[in-house]
Image (tube, helix red, strand yellow):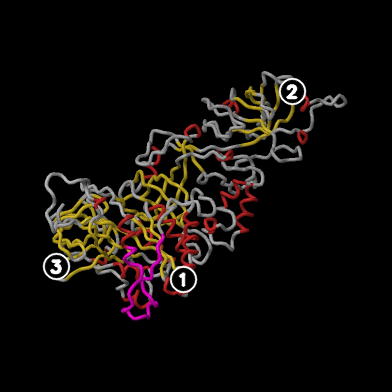
Amino acid sequence: MAGRRVNVNVGVLGHIDSGKTALARALSTTASTAAFDKQPQSRERGITLDLGFSCFSVPLPARLRPAPLGAEPEPGAEPRLQVTLVDCPGHASLIRTIIGGAQIIDLMMLVIDVTKGMQTQSAECLVIGQIACQKLVVVLNKTDLLPEGKRQAAVDKMTKKMQKTLENTKFRGAPIIPVAARPGGPDAPETEAPQGIPELIELLTSQISIPRRDPSGPFLMAVDHCFSIKGQGTVMTGTILSGSVSLGDSVEIPTLKVVRKVKSMQMFHTPVTSAVQGDRLGICVTQFDPRLLERGLVCAPESLHTVHAAIISVEKIPYFRGCLQTKAKFHITVGHETVMGRVMFFSPAPDGFDREPVLDSFDFSQEYLFQEQYLCPGSGPAETDGGEADRRAGQASEGRCPRQQWALVEFEKPVTCPRLCLVIGSRLDADIHANTCRLAFHGVLLHGLEDKNYAESALPGLRVYKLKHKHGVVERVTDDYSVIGRSLFRKETNIQLFVGLKVRLSTGELGVIAGAFGQSGKFKVHIPVFPDKVWNRFVISPKSKTSPAPSDVPAVLSAPDSPVVRRLPFIPDVWEAPTANPRMTLGPREGRADRRPALLDLSSFRDARPGLLQQHRSAEGNRQSYPWWRPHLGGRGSLPAQEASSQ
């Protein structure tokens, strides 16, 4: 271990013009070829446009050193902790780059302009940090701009606000430290010494923990810059995601389908002969056109594949307003690559909602339930063609949602990525000035579909079924044990396929379909026990000696749309325990004062509790002038879904 350097990657994220690059410069002792806005475009515009890398090193803390084995280490060969700073852009339009940079960091520094507090991109960076890393340090920058007499009071006030912001996140209790990375601003002379930097380095050293590094497994590196050196070859710089690499190894560039030999390697201008997972590295290989690989992956030969679609375990980001609809298009980010993709959500069968999540594999032998949208507590129903969105339909109607959900993502362009990589779905086409969170969901890629014709070759093995609902009405009572129903089947439907299926009256009594009644789609339902409380609702008038007119019948009949779909929707207050056959239901129309026959209902499964959709819209409308992260600052309410579900 003598003389060894242990590398840890620390991200520098925050809103534009919060002083991130100045902070990275103040901390760093060594800069890479792409540090501190060296690109001409960055200097011209005065903002960071790409990822920048620099580093500093300190003696490796004793708590991070492994227990000594045998002899003491040689004097003067102290191991060092190398902290690589990943300076990310702050402009909203560059969020693709921010997401890519966040996926290679071990700890995140969230830089806040102390004179402005939390801003839109600060909040988005905080969301990205919750997804991509485990530890956070908040840096209150530009303290030199505060009046000296009120400086400490202003810092204390902002510290309390940030503590409140972090209260409902995984970073609750994260340390907060004030600094002035560039006293006097960008136009001040560089002779002005930064303030609070030694204290920040000490804090970072105490907060850093070394992730588990595994040199075994196939080599994989995320490349963020590529350039050529005349007479030597092409240099690719990036972070090793898995495995290790040594001089003379062959590496593959999957997007170019070429294999090159490693000629030399450097870590921040220091030649090395090998590197392992987590290291920041520059690899020089035999010549190829660097313009063909601005960003991407480099791997061990034949260890990575290109996929056209993927199955991911998905989780909605709670700050995203609105529903995640099946067939909707999102910007899908995998590593440094962002492409458009269409999603289809599905969940376990209702009896598997409480099953323990499995985050490292996907079981094709199980059956899954198609969802029109991602299910979450308080999610309202989507509008349907029949305008009956407020009808009872949805597995989440009682606040019960599956512990794990999945999505089939179909990419518009093929993507090269490893299995179990992080996937983030966003709406990056949203107005960057709008007060909304653009990050919609995140997940883990469980299975990639490599065949271009996956719809024919692979999707038939994905056992996802879909449920539909239709509603009919009870037309009349024929005797003590039978009723006639209609408006559930078309006249050409073979009702014999449904004979023997169980039904339920609105009062809870069970019956079975006995057969067809005529040729118009009507059917007869046999009810073994027909108590007086039910019969009285269908009493025959002594004068007319006829059954009530259809417009007076207060019951509806619900059943699956097709005999081919033999599954049960999860509606606890209507459906019985699952059996081999689907059940049909007789139930009252909720919230209706009139007694007209129910219409056909093909609404999807959504929470249709009375007034929920209206509450949701009202709650969303009332907060449009407030930042979407304000709930954590003690502002109005919480997220729309949370607010609606609490009412």
**Mark 3 against mark 2, which lies toward the viewer?**
3
Label 2, residues with CA under 10 Å away: few <14, some 14-19, many ≥20: few
Residue position for label 2: 478
Depth check: give the residue in front, 283 or 373: 283
Q: Which residues are magenta?
A: 176-200
Q: Amino acid at mark 3?
A: Gln
Q: Is residue 109 magenta?
A: no
Label of residue 151 in the image: 1
**Mark 2 against mark 1, which lies toward the viewer?**
1
Depth check: give the residue in front, 575 or 40: 40
Residues marked 3 and 1 touching at CB (< 8 Å): no
Q: Main secondary structure of the magenta part?
A: loop
Q: Is residue 177 magenta?
A: yes
- Give left or right: position of 430 versus 60: right
| Residue 160 in picture, x, y percent from top left | 49, 60
Label 3, residues with CA under 10 Å away: few <14, some 14-19, many ≥20: few
| Residue 353 in picture, x, y percent from top left | 48, 36
Label 1, residues with CA under 10 Å away: few <14, some 14-19, many ≥20: some
Label of residue 232 in the image: 3
As displayed, is residue 497 above or below residue 74? Answer: above
- Give left or right: position of 638 versus 204: right
Tell me the CA gap for discs 2 and 1. 86 Å
Residue in view at x 42 percent, y 69 percent:
18
Quarter of the figure with residue 622: bottom right
**Mark 3 against mark 1, which lies toward the viewer?**
1
